[in-house]
């Protein structure tokens, strides 16, 4: 069952957003890296970075006592860390999630304009009206949503636990209103048999993966394992050896015997994959451009807005702070905590949004 599709999120120039972070030479990079590390210590700040951000930010998080993970684990790490300030290298909903779970801390981002097509494609006002039109359904939203959308939800889920929660709700006889990613929602619907009404959002990176070109690439590399994030179209997911969250795909590169992998998710994840399994060959699944030849393929343009330059600027100026109105935060934390409590009762970690 499908909801009307919202207005598509337009990307300037028809393909990518021009990143605000210019490339760095080696000496500038080393100087900024050292400066950022020093400022993090001086400001009592911890850096949490998403798997899709630039490798320098992931290295800096690891070397400075921070954390690299998916967005919910980033937020939970920030909540549990003793630092009074959390710097979130990722996209806007990740900074908001960190603030929802750590209201007493200051939360900053290198660029507040770094958003997400799933978030942008699910405006809170439209979503609330849609929910109000279907009051008999339990509202389950993916973590890739704004604080206001989370505040309207009954549950927030990640791709790592969404199947378990939807199966649980279905067993209770509940029907689901799902948002925002229609591909992830469709995958869960197929796997669980749940009665789901799907908001028709999508991720601009994962939606771009092409099944026909993937078939051609698999034919060229028949010994390669195919790893696919479930935000991808169904005909791409159907070709996967492993379907899973960001954390699950990194684990697959380490655990599987294959020496070659075709990866259908943001190529920023290659940094952690190479750390986990050095020497293995990683290929980006075909995305934008014929044969996936364009340089912008499989990388979120908003993630690319994060860099050492604007990270240092934020640490120096204390601009780009995340604020959430307290009534919204209090409602949003209920749906997040419902998921976390569910996970604790089943003695498992919650991992795996984009």
Image: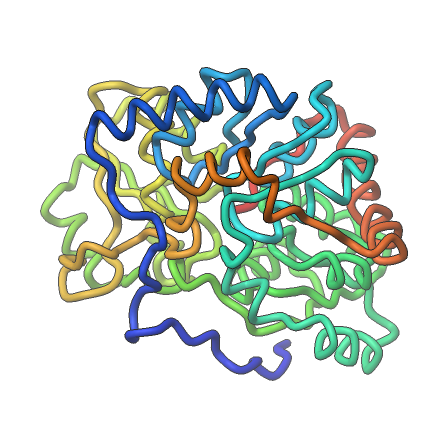
Q: In this rendering, would 22 be left or right of 43? A: left
Check the image and name the residue furthest to the left: 220
Q: Position of residue 217 (x, y in %)?
A: 16, 51
Residue 144 in which image quadrant: bottom right
Q: Nearer the viewer, residue 156 or 8?
A: 8
Q: Residue at x 33, y 51 (%)?
A: 299
Q: Is residue 343 above or below residue 321?
A: above
Q: Residue at x 83, y 43 (%)?
A: 338
Q: Is residue 74 above or below residue 156?
A: above
Structure colour scheme: rainbow
Q: Position of residue 31 (x, y in %)?
A: 32, 24
Q: In this rendering, would 228 be left or right of 145? A: left
Q: Nearer the viewer, residue 179 or 218?
A: 179
Q: Is residue 248 above or below residue 41?
A: below
Q: Residue at x 31, y 20 (%)?
A: 277
Q: Nearer the viewer, residue 187 or 340?
A: 340
Q: Position of residue 305 (x, y in %)?
A: 41, 50
Q: Nearer the viewer, residue 116 or 264?
A: 116
């Amino acid at each position: 069952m499908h909801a009307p599709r919202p207005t598509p999120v337009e990307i300037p120039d028809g393909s990518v957003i021009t990143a605000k972070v210019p490339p760095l030479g080696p000496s500038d990079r080393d100087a900024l890296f050292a400066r950022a590390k020093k400022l993090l210590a001086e400001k009592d700040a911890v850096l949490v970075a998403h798997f899709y951000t630039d490798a320098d930010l992931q290295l800096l998080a690891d070397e400075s006592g921070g954390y690299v993970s998916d967005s919910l684990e980033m937020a939970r790490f920030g909540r549990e860390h003793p630092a009074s300030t959390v710097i979130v290298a990722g996209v806007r909903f990740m900074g908001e999630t960190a603030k929802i779970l750590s209201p007493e801390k200051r939360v900053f981002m290198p660029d507040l304009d770094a958003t997400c097509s799933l978030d942008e494609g699910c405006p809170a006002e439209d979503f609330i009206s849609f929910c109000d039109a279907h009051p008999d359904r339990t509202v389950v939203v993916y973590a890739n949503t704004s604080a206001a959308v989370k505040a309207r939800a009954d549950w927030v889920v990640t791709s790592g636990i969404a199947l378990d929660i939807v199966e649980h709700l279905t067993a209770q006889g509940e029907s689901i209103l799902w948002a925002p990613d229609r591909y992830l929602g469709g995958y869960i619907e197929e796997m669980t048999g749940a009665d789901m009404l799907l908001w028709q959002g999508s991720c601009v990176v994962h939606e771009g993966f092409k099944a026909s070109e993937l078939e051609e690439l698999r034919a060229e590399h028949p010994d390669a394992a195919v790893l696919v994030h479930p935000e991808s179209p169904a005909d791409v997911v159907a070709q996967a050896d492993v379907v899973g969250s960001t954390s699950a795909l990194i684990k697959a590169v380490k655990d599987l015997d294959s020496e070659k992998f075709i990866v259908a998710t943001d190529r920023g994840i290659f940094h952690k994959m190479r750390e986990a399994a050095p020497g293995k060959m990683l290929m980006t699944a075909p995305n934008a451009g014929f044969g996936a030849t364009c340089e912008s393929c499989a990388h979120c343009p908003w993630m690319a807005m994060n860099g050492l330059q604007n990270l240092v600027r934020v640490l120096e100026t204390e601009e780009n702070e995340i604020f959430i109105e307290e009534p919204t935060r209090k409602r949003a934390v209920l749906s997040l905590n419902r998921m976390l409590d569910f996970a604790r009762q089943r003695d498992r970690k919650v991992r795996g949004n984009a």
